[in-house]
Image (cartoon, rainbow, N blue to C red):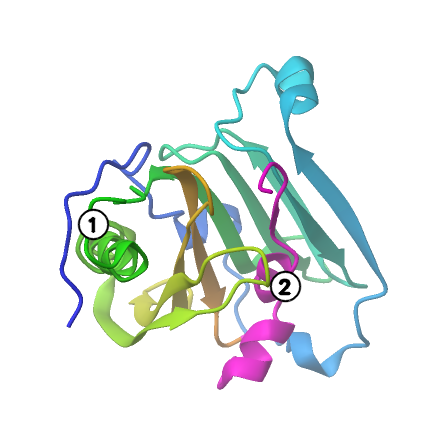
Amino acid sequence: MFRAMAIIAAGLAATAPAAAQTASAEGEFSFNLFEFSGVTLSDVYTFDESYTERFGIAVPVPFRLDVPRRDGVGVIADGRPDGGGFVRFTFYTETDAGERVFLENIQVVTATIPLLPEAQDPAEARIGTMIDLVQNIVYPRAVEGFVSPEILALEEIPLGPDVPNAVQLIGRYVDPPLGEMLLRIVAMPHPAQPESYVTISNIRLAMVPVNDGETLRQSMTGRVMESWDYLDHP
């Protein structure tokens, strides 16, 4: 059993990226992300010193990610969004009248995940820290104010050959204007330092019917997560 450790997290005071922020009342509007043709292009976003110079937003840990494009889906990129996050990408479609309809979003939040070299098993202790972070700190704030929150899975997942394993929480809740939502929280540990990030994704299941790991990966936010890369690790 993992031992929960003390955690120092920055920017987690209000992490829930409110799903309805970019949505409008669309009535009987129908859309299914997985019924459309595959993604053909992605925009590469690099967050490093040059990003700080251009936008005046400090980057605690350099990283890059790919934001996919798909016909019929727009994206809004918010640097330093409301709620204490570092950056947020919101995906939407539009009605025939031009009203934006929320599909998914992903917010990146800065966090400190200690390396814990003094522990008997530092890797296991760090996993325990991340479990505590996503389950007891981020999750309650991410579902605050929503209806019927529920944790479906809490697990360790691989990120890549050069990056330590992450911890992922999958949950769901109901946003009364939008319906049932899937929540994905991932603690993204940097391999060599405590400064790291947490990602928080909200997926509108009526529009993006995720029902297993493969459809989660094929969602727009899932594709963003698949591309994540810390830039300054050995």
Mark 1 or 2: in front is: 1
Residue 204 in sight from this viewpoint: yes
Q: Secondary structure at mark 1?
A: helix
Q: Say left or right for 180 vs 159.
A: left
Residue 215 position, x and y percent, is 58, 80
Residue 57, quarter of the rendered image: top right
Compute the Cα span from label 1 to label 2. 25 Å
Three-letter code for the amino acid on which mark 1 is drawn: Ile
The 10 Å Cα crowd at callout 2, few under 14, some 14 to 19, many 20 or more, is: many
Which mark, by number, is residue 151? none
> Where, quadrant-wise, is the N terminus in this rendering?
bottom left
Q: Residue at x 23, y 69 (%)?
A: 149
In the image, 160 versus 78, the foreground residue is 160
Magenta stretch, residue numbers:
207-234
In the image, 11 versus 124, the foreground residue is 124
Residue 50, quarter of the rendered image: top right
In the image, 233 versus 145, the foreground residue is 233
Which mark, by number, is residue 137? 1
Q: Which residue is mark 2?
A: 220
The 10 Å Cα crowd at callout 1, few under 14, some 14 to 19, many 20 or more, is: some
Q: Secondary structure at mark 2?
A: helix
Q: Residue at x 86, y 65 (%)?
A: 40
Three-letter code for the amino acid on which mark 2 is drawn: Met
